Each structure stands twice: as C-alpha cells, then as structure tokens.
C-alpha cells in the first residue's frame, strides 16, 4: 500500500537477524559454592538448639533430640520413638486418676491460711513460763499453726519435672553413652568421646537395644585400643557378654603371644573370677608355646638301627640280588 510518513505500519514478515551470537560474561562477583544438604541442616538445628521434639532420658538426665532423626536410624529405633510419642499423647489427652485425686485434695486446702488467721487469742497461762518463747525464737511465733504437709510441694515438683516433649527412656546408667549416640547420629566430629569401660558397655547395650550397627562398631574400636594387662580381662569379659567372638580371639591371642603379659594376666586376681577366660588363655598358650616334639620313628627303623652295619649291608645285598 501507500506509505505515509509518521504512520506505524506492520510488515508482513520478520526481518532476518542471522544466527544468535554467544556473549561471554566475565569478571563476575565471587560466589560461594552451595554445600548445604539435609545432613548439614539437621546438624545445624541440633547445634543451635532448634526444633527439638523429643527427650532422651537416662535417669535424671534429659538430652533433647529430634524424633525423625532418631527414628531413621533403624526399625527398632523407630518403634521406640513411636511408643514414646504414643505414651506422651495418651498422658496429655487423659490425665491419670492419681492426678485427679491430687487436684481434688488441693482444692479445699486453699482457704487454710485464712482459717489460721482467725485463731482466737490464747487463754491465760496456767504456768508462769507457759507462753515464753523458746531460745532462738521471737515473740509471736508461739501461736503460729504447724506448716502444711509437704505433699503439695512434691506435687508441684512433679508437675515441674513433667516434660513438654515425648521422652524416650534408655535402659542404661551412663548419660555419656547417650551423648555418644547423639554425636554419631548428628555427625558431630569423628572422635568417640567415651572415658570409661563401663560407659562403653552402655554404648554396646544401646546399640543392641536400638539395633544400630554403626554404634556397635564404635564401641568395638574402643575395646581394641589401649589394651593393657590391667584391663585385658575386663575387655575379654565384655566381648563374651556381647558376643564379640572375633574381637575376643584377637585380644586373647595378643595376650598369649606376649609371655610377660600372659604371666601378669594369669596371676591377676581378676581373672580368677572368670575361670572360663583363664582356661581359654591356658589352652591357647599350650598350643602356641608347646615345644615341637621330634618326629616319631617306627619300630622297624629302631630294629634296623640295632643290627650291625655289616649284617645290614649283607641283607640289603641279598635283597637287591633277588
């Protein structure tokens, strides 16, 4: 059509721009490489004390944790967490009869202080020293009624100790073992922070109760290190108790190979409490340290040795000629 100046018109086709040209952008600002993952996030939550929803209880010690983290360790651990949550929800929804009885007893006890304030004045003393204050007390303390029983105080203490989260009670005696479990679960360092053989036994108990093989491996590594003649019997007994047969044989063999160590362990009073361990040490020692006897010679060889050399030579010659 006719083109007019100042009027916008649309063309029938697109202009040819050619193939796209790649543009390289350089001199970018420094950017950190993203290294955030689920494990790091959970570890950060634990270290910054956030989103706790479960307590591990060892006696009077309470250690906070996360339900989903512990439940992911094994089916047995997941089941223990489920039970703890179910008991907690049941306790919140339906208070026990004992709590109801305590509440009923506490209600009429509230006006007690007012009743005490209305105590009538004391009568005239019968004896001259009847209303005198006891040594170390002040005037006026003689008419104060006895204090209320301590049961309300204990009830308040029990309410205070009641947790606001589900609690997973661990059947061990060492809180140190529970901390070792949490350190492993959350990946807090590579060190195994156990300071005694008894605490390490509790770690083995936890590994068995919750079916956590990785925790068992850590405890086995502790048993295999720093073995001395002083703790060797205790380590061997621990291996027997938890069925660590391969580790038991390894420790036993090292004790037996060293004659001086074997003498100290065999003469220790501790080994006398475990006769099966002493018997195993002696049997293995007999196999290792017994001198090798000379090879036995048969009766025919002994008879031939008694024959005179010339006669023996003649016998051999006849035998060869035949």
Image (tube, grey):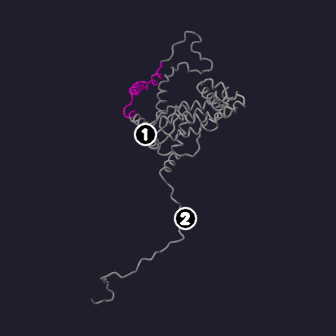
- Bin the neighbour count of mark 2 within 10 Å (Cα to Cα): few under 14, some 14-19, many 20 and up: few
Which residue is more in the foreground, 119 or 225?
225
Which residues, given as a range, are shown in magenta? 90-119
Q: Nearer the viewer, mark 1 or mark 2?
A: 1
Query: For this view, does 216 lie left or right of residue 252?
Result: left
Q: Position of residue 19 (x, y in %)?
A: 41, 78
Q: What residue does disc 1 label?
A: 75
Task: For marks 1 and 2, give the CA distance.
Answer: 45 Å
Q: How many marks?
A: 2
Would residue 229 be seen by someone viewing this image from the given angle?
A: no
Residue drawn at 50 percent across, 24 percent down: 150
Residue drawn at 61 percent across, 28 percent down: 283
Residue drawn at 65 percent across, 24 percent down: 269
Which residue is more in the foreground, 125 or 169?
169
Location of residue 21 with respect to 214 vertically, above or below: below
Q: What residue does disc 2 label?
A: 30
Considering the numbered disc 1 on the image, is that residue within a helix, a strand or a loop? helix
Location of residue 35 with respect to 18 vertically, above or below: above
Which residue is more in the foreground, 319 or 244?
319
């Amino acid at each position: 059509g006719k083109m007019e100046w100042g009027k916008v018109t649309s063309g029938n086709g697109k202009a040819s721009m050619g193939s796209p040209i790649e543009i390289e952008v350089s001199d970018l600002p420094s950017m950190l490489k993203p290294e955030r993952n689920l494990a790091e996030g959970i570890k950060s939550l634990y270290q910054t004390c956030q989103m706790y929803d479960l307590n591990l209880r060892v006696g009077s010690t309470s250690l906070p944790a996360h339900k989903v983290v512990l439940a992911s360790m094994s089916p047995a651990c997941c089941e223990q967490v489920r039970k703890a949550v179910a008991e907690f929800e049941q306790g919140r929804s339906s208070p026990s009869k004992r709590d109801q009885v305590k509440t009923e007893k506490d209600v009429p006890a509230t006006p007690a202080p007012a009743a005490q304030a209305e105590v009538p004045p004391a009568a005239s003393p019968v004896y001259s020293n009847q209303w005198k204050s006891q040594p170390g007390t002040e005037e006026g303390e003689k008419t104060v009624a006895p204090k209320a029983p301590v049961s309300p105080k204990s009830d308040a203490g029990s309410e205070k100790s009641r947790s606001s989260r589900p609690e997973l009670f661990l059947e061990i005696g060492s809180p140190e073992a529970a901390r070792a479990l949490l350190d492993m679960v959350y990946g807090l360092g590579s060190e195994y922070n156990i300071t005694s053989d008894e605490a390490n036994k509790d770690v083995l108990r936890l590994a068995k109760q919750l079916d956590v093989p990785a925790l068992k491996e850590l405890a086995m590594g502790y048993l295999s290190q720093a073995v001395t003649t002083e703790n060797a019997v205790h380590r061997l007994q621990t291996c027997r108790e938890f069925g660590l047969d391969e580790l038991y044989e390894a420790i036993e063999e090292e004790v037996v190979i060293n004659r001086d160590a074997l003498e100290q362990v065999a003469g220790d009073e501790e080994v006398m409490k475990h006769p099966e361990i002493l018997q195993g040490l002696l049997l293995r020692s007999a196999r290792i340290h017994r001198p090798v006897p000379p090879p036995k010679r048969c009766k025919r060889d002994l008879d031939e040795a008694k024959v005179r050399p010339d006669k023996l030579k003649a016998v051999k010659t006849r035998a060869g000629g035949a």
